[in-house]
Image: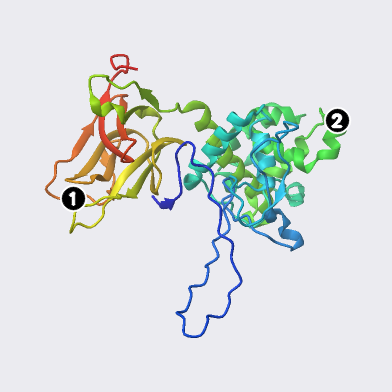
Amino acid sequence: MRASSGGPFPGCFHQGPRPSQATPQANPPGSQPRARAVPLPNPDCVVCCRPIEPSNREKETWKSFYQPLGFDTKTGELLAAQRYQPGCSQVHMHSCCWEVAQNVTDFMPLNQTSLMDFARHLLNLKPFATQTPFDCETNDVDHELWAETQHNPESDTNADHECRGILSSAAFKKITRWLKQNPLTANVDDVQKIDKCLAYCISRGMPYALASDKDMNIRPNLMRALQNLQTSDASRFPKTYNLRVAWDNIQSALDAMKSSPLPRVLRPIPELNASRRIIKFCIPTEKCHRLTFSFIRMQIKPSGLQPSMIISGFGYDGKGLGCWGENHILRVQALKGLHLARDSFAGFTAIRVKNNEKWSEWFGTPRDGVDDLELEWETKKNLILHFDKTLNRITGAGIKSRVSDLPL
């Protein structure tokens, strides 16, 4: 569980322009000292979670180049990679990470809408992403991966480990079992059916040989790679480990983009005047596994009261609703309850959820002596959240088995 700043919700994936840092000048005689501009930190890549920053060092030039996620208005082609300059307002992704993303997505056809949807999911799920373990690029593999070794993974009786993080235990067992069943040959297409990332690693490590023979027998190379990954320390293969982490971060966002539906907007009820400014969103609870709760400070407060932080938005698996502000994140296995703490004036100031049979900690500041809104359910339900578009806050919640009985 972490707190973060920034917008997890649709349409909020652009970062605002950064103020330029002026050269400090001496203060005029008799004047008050002027505050110096504090340089803002460089943005983090939405894939590897490492900074995009200017660098002139040969081994760190990958840090300086990012992929603009947009199309040339004249040619219709994707914009070329650019050297990062402070003040860029794009979604930030290293150009090397974009190359990995293209392979994860199988170079799927993209238009401006689908590209922005993909970028939005990467950004919204970045708080849940894993930072690459080594300070190097993500689109390459280590030549040491193919070095000779005396270890034989086929005879390994303890394959329950995760092959030092490159392969899950399930993928490792599957591929070793496949090697036993096919003792003579293997090609890249065979490996891709089992683990696309490992197939990409082999392709990156043998580009010229595979270019001349697509059906080349790579079994010896695959055996050496598995042996080395199983027996060597991670620091021996920093590029390969980074590639796997970046691959998994992208795949997670792609899966959420494809499988998790957008919140459904329910049609307002004409008889209720308040419905003109209240939007009701319908969210399937079985799709809620990575949650984001967003808070903003209310703009209006009664005299003598401290301003409250109120719940302004709710995000799930890369999608969401409301207004973004200060964000808190939480992973859940099964969402089975929602508890909103109410303030007598501000609205909802805290939230906690029921993960299976256990309630989470509070996010926000619960107030005493005011009625709360508490919901619990056992089976798959649709969570209905009410958002006041005038006050920028969540004002209510409910549960429905079906939405067919609600006005759409």
Q: What secondary structure is marked by label 2? A: loop
Judge whether 59 appears above or below 93 on screen: below
Tell me where residue 401 appears, x and y as whole percent.
28, 20
Outermost residue toward the left?
369
Residue at image mark 2: 213
On the rendered structure, is 202 left or right of 332?
A: right
Outermost residue toward the top?
404
Dot 1 surroundings within 10 Å: few (below 14), some, or many (20 or more)?
A: some
Judge whether 131 appears above or below 354 on screen: below
Q: Residue 280 appears in which quarter of the rendering?
A: top left
Q: Residue 191 appears in which quarter of the rendering?
A: top right
Residue at image mark 1: 367
Q: What secondary structure is marked by label 1? A: loop
Dot 2 surroundings within 10 Å: few (below 14), some, or many (20 or more)?
A: few
Q: Earlier in the sequence, mark 1 or mark 2?
A: 2
Does residue 150 appear anywhere in the picture?
A: no
Judge whether 30 appears above or below 335 on screen: below
Tell me where residue 408 appears, x and y as whole percent.
35, 17
Tell me where residue 266 appears, x and y as whole percent.
34, 22
**Residue type (three-letter) at the residue carrying disc 2:** Asp
| Numbered badge on residue 293 | none
